[in-house]
Amino acid sequence: MSNLKNNGNGKKAVVLLSGGLDSFTAAAIAKEAGFSCYGLTINYGQRHRIELDCAKGVADYLNLAAHRVAELDMTWIGGSALTDTIEVPKHKKQNKSNNDIPSTYVPARNTIFLSLALGWAEALGAFDIFIGANAVDYSGYPDCRPDFLDSFEKMANLATKASVTGVGHFTLHAPLVDLTKDDIIRKGIDLGIDYAITHSCYDPTPDNSACGSCDSCQLRLKGFADAGLTDPVKYINNKG
Amino acid sequence: MSNLKNNGNGKKAVVLLSGGLDSFTAAAIAKEAGFSCYGLTINYGQRHRIELDCAKGVADYLNLAAHRVAELDMTWIGGSALTDTIEVPKHKKQNKSNNDIPSTYVPARNTIFLSLALGWAEALGAFDIFIGANAVDYSGYPDCRPDFLDSFEKMANLATKASVTGVGHFTLHAPLVDLTKDDIIRKGIDLGIDYAITHSCYDPTPDNSACGSCDSCQLRLKGFADAGLTDPVKYINNKG
């Protein structure tokens, strides 16, 4: 991984965009660093489909070089509250000290998304990939941690043409990985981005209000509160 | 990676099935070793769609526990003769000594397929994944080499719940990786499988005859010849 010491200088980069707060901030950081950004969003059968509209909104807002919504039905894999009929947990006490991985974890999701980003990057001639993974104020997913991201980067450099031709080296950028949620929000505000166009809730209402109670809403609300700010998105009971 | 010293003992394994000779043999080896096999085939927009029917035939033939054809359009990634309008090269001299990666290479294909296999394995509670990758009589794809496969296995063990809970360890089996094509064919014949139900050609005719001239056909024909056998599939000009 890199902590973005290097500058983009107009180089192409693939940026994973979920439509949420973190990936928006990561994309804004990539643009600020001078990369020509190609946004990649995966329609994987998630229950919070508003994500896709928000991702398109983020790509427009940041005026990315391109934005692609790739179709990949992951509902057949099962095993997650986000793609299955398992209920999304609410009002859960946040506790990162145990080994409890929540039911909203989607098996191998970041591995799959990063693999698709890698394929597109290779075809584009890009060697930089951005992901908004965060390992501080997060839900405890294994595929958000620095060890995983470092390992993916190593693997990527053995998986692709570059490992044979010696031309190019992939860098996986996770500029938020060590930040708290309020630091992420402050960073985004400093960059002048408007979080009103994002969506984080795992289980929004039919009119796309955030529930305020799932892991993701709780982390987001705490982040805005810790940053001394009000979350601009609509909550079911105006918690923002 | 493992060289299959361990025995399946009825454990679940996910097996990538392309419909070709190699993955059929790898699946037969997995069954022989005692694994309960879950076949996974990806419909990625490949021009040789007959693969999908052959993969279903292989799954039936081996009486796998389950077979899934996952839909993943990869044509948008581009950059390959197998998914794009680039012409499939014919009558190419086989030369593995240079760094020439053929246009039939699909960017990050094995990384993406293995990631999907990993997701399904995790949801199934399986810790074994089989792939028919081969690094001897192959087209020079970077994602068929042992270094890549070892690296993927390491990454997989950091990507998933097991890395947090400590329950289980993923093993990536590539039982053909060091074999010549004729050794692979002899192995399959020893296991009693019928290669007539497979398909290897990158550019079959409309009636699904193999072209006999693409990299894949050339490697297959040479393998059968070196094994002193006749390829049972139909070729456009009866080269088999």
Image (spheres, coloured by chain):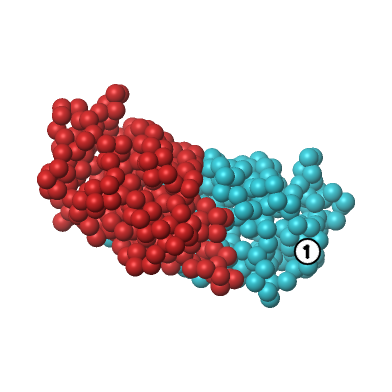
Chain colours: A red, B cyan
Compare residues A117 and A21 and report the one nearer the observer.
A21
Place of residue A129 in the rendered image (x, y in percent of width and height, measured from the top left): 43, 57
User: Which residue is depicted at the point 15% across and 29% down?
Assistant: A238
In the image, A124: left or right of A33? Answer: right
- For the image, the number of numbered tags is 1
Using the rendered view, name the quadrant where residue B213 is placed.
bottom right
Q: Residues within 10 Å of mark 1 (few under 14, many from 20)?
A: few
Host chain of mark 1: B
For residue B132, say whether it is visible: yes
In the image, B57: left or right of A194? Answer: right
Q: Is residue B151 above or below residue A237?
A: below
Compare residues B115 and A218 and report the one nearer the observer.
A218
For residue A83, say whether it is visible: no
Place of residue A149 in the rendered image (x, y in percent of width and height, measured from the top left): 36, 61
In the image, A212: left or right of A118? Answer: left
Q: Amino acid at mark 1?
A: Lys
Place of residue A191 in the rendered image (x, y in percent of width and height, measured from the top left): 28, 51
Q: Quadrant of the C terminus of chain B?
A: bottom right
User: Which residue is depicted at the point 71% across and 66% down?
Assistant: B182
User: Which residue is depicted at the point 61% across and 63% down?
Assistant: B141
User: Which residue is depicted at the point 85% across and 56% down?
Assistant: B239
State the residue position of label 1.
B92
Place of residue A91 in the rendered image (x, y in percent of width and height, measured from the top left): 15, 37
Circle 1: element type: loop
